[in-house]
Image: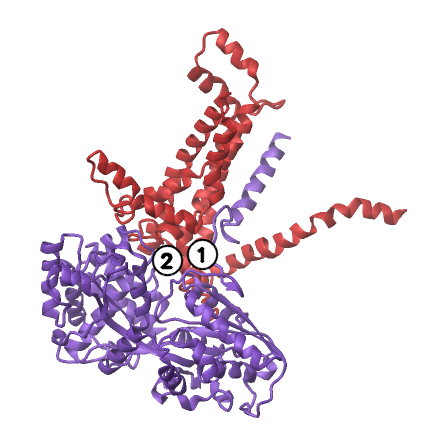
Amino acid sequence: MKKNQKFIALGLVAAMAMSTVACGNQSSGETPQPETETQTQTPAEPAADTQAEAEPAPEESAAEPAAESDGSYENCTLTISWWGGDSRHEATLAAIDAFKEKYPGIEVEATYGAWSGWEDSMATMFATQTAPDINQVNWNWLEAYSADGSAFLDLNQVSDVLDLSQYDQGALDQCVVAGELQAIPVSMTGRIFYWNKTTFDKAGIGTPTTLEELMAAGETFKTVLGDEYYPLTLGEYDRMILMVYYLESVYGKAWVENGELQYTSEEVQAGLEFIQSLEDAHVIPSIQTITGDGAESLDKNPKWMNGTYAGIFEWDSSASKFNAALEEGQEFIVGDYLPDMGDYQGGFSKVSLGFAISETCAHPKEAAMLLNFLLNEDEGTTIMASERGIPLSTAALANCQAQGLLNETVAEANGKVLAWVDYPLDSQFEAAALKSSDGVYYDVMAGLSYQDYSIEEAAEVLIDGVNEALSK
Amino acid sequence: MGKNKFLKRNVGFLFILPWLIGFLVFKLYPFAASLYYSFTDYQLFEGITKYTMENYVDIFTTPKIVKALKVTFQYSFMTVPLKLVAALFIAYILNFKIKGVNFFRTAYYIPSILGGSVAIAVLWKAIFKDDGLLNTLLGFFGVNGPSWLSDPSYALFVICLLRVWQFGSAMVIFLAALKGVPEELYEAASIEGAGKWKQFFSITVPLITPIIFYNLVTQICQAFQEFNGPYIITQGGPRNSTTLISLLIYNSAFKNYEMGMASAMAWVLFIILMVFTVIAFLSQKYWVYYSDEEGR
């Protein structure tokens, strides 16, 4: 009798432990969930991001001939997803409402949320073909989730409805994977310096225009303002991108070309030494210092808000987010590239994000109509404005410029980026195995900063990681 | 008549059908599927290209995974005893007839229902960041507090503390057990001159050992599967010092899409859990007292 009880008890424990390999711990807490319709979000998006969709009824998708722009449409329900902050949600929802008013037979259901955890859930949807019809997608998602073109529709099939002539061919080419135009690029972006001029004024120096001035600013900040003040702050991924900009400026070649890393171990070591020299010269705080600030992201870090950290190296499309985070009385300005970093104009621009129609979308023509409305037509672009960066669509850009809808800071930064950077970016640069908080970039840059790695070890780990990602 | 009898005999199955379907679909199937996947190189977007034992070999040869296992053991060995002691101690105090006891019982239970929410992450960061509440308090006493969140030596402690702080559910179970200890045993012990501590260790603890055992097993299961704490507060950092194996399983499955490896890690975790559970069950005869007809 007693033994039976023990067996039953053991069985129950086994069932409980079974959840380890089945559905995991459900005892407490919550994991990020995308929201639908009227939910609200916290803006925690990266500058370059997006997603794509999928839905039933495969008969009408891939094999279909190009849609015709005869103005007719089928009554249907479309689903669309995106990530972003509150202002992006509001603008997109308003634009969707305007679309529904124009095409009363088309219902649109929206799913949207903050960036945090978004890619994880979208990846699962892409894998299971349960994503919405239209999805905001990050550029690298095309390679990651649709390398064979199976997830997203070739937009050339709906080019009679979706006006592709509004887009620069080079930008469109960046969205061609497996010979198919899998997404429509919304904007281009690149990294650039932003400065808090107020803090530099307090330190009695101007904002840096050369690398030499930047290096000198570290010591000035330390002696004039105090140990906790830094002219620039860089997280792990920021360091990686700045290192690539630096290496391209010095050596005059792209980081990766034709699927191969173009840099030797010695050259990568030089790049890592450059990053470490910034930390040693009190130009940037250590990773430990930034982690100890306890902030979810840099724009939410009180030290950025109050000017203790006086500079960032960020996506041009993120300018308004960082500007808005500053406390009153701080002056935010767009910086310049540092010409003495090297003999070449190092750096890259890339498709910030795009929209893709799912391969399994039952109504690709109507989905393309919605995209065209949001991205090209005056009525939609007036509402969307520069919520996803400076529009690539010439029609949208002209409309926004004519109406003064563009954020001036973002426009200035975008103009500087596109005028300076010159090197291509391989989409594998943003592969999850490299870019995620669990990835190689974080490991290398944090390991270097925490002094877990020597320069040589860090270079080896980085090169091995990049080569492994490129081999996939 | 026969039909009625059949219905009467089997109507119970109808009532448990929703649970049964849920168990088969959401527990048993994933359980079996994960075992299968663990012997493959299943990648979410590339499918299975080969069957292999490599995942299990990699688990014990990849430094990052070995470290995660080590951290998981450290975490469990710290939180389980601390949480049980805290829960039992507070339950013992709240078992006395003190003024406002219901308020205190509720107050101590609340943290355990907060779980691993974003609000808790914000709270914990506000307390433990470099210039947070704790270091500010320490500063009043002239102590320069460490970097709790960013120093790999301390970060795991912060995560452990979150779990220990959420002792409410274990406390409630202990409280119910303490209520079941016969009052006359304490009276007899008092007459014999036993003090409160003597009574606690000689009467209370032995009589509630089945409940201690129950809490021990459930807490071991929960501790080894802990995910929320490190996910919301440190994301496994700094330098993987709070990367528990469950977080690594999540990252492997949903960030790197390596479902085969994630399944193998989950199975290793399952086996570890079963070993500890079996050890706990086998140890019963040495320390758990059951007051049924067979006694111990």
Disc 1: CA contacts within 10 A as few (<14), some (14-19) or many (>=20): many
**Which numbered tag is attached to residue B264?**
1
Tags 1 and 2 in contact by the CB under 8 Å rule?
Answer: yes
Q: Position of residue A6 (x, y in %)?
A: 58, 34
**Which numbered tag is attached to residue A69?**
none
Q: Pick whichever of labels 1 and 2 is earlier in the sequence.
A: 2
What's the residue type where badge 2 is placed?
Answer: Asp
Classify residue A414 by image quadrant: bottom left
Q: Which residue is mark 2?
A: B58
Residue most toward the right? Answer: B1
Total number of numbered labels?
2
Task: Specify the colour of chain A.
Answer: purple
The image shows residue B198, relative to residue B114, as above or below, that is above
Q: Nearer the viewer, residue A96 or B159?
A: A96
Please state if A216 lies on the left or on the right of A148 as rendered: left
Colour scheme shown: by chain
Q: Position of residue B52 (x, y in %)?
A: 44, 63
Q: Nearer the viewer, residue B292 or B227?
A: B227
Residue at 43% across, 65% down = A86
Q: Is residue A386 at all visible to an observer of this figure?
A: yes
Q: Position of residue B101 (x, y in %)?
A: 50, 26
Residue at 40% across, 79% down = A186
Q: Position of residue A284 (x, y in %)?
A: 18, 60
Please state if A419 lies on the left or on the right of A51 as rendered: left
The image shows residue A277, relative to residue B116, as above or below, that is below
- Per the image, label 1 sits on a secondary structure element best described as helix
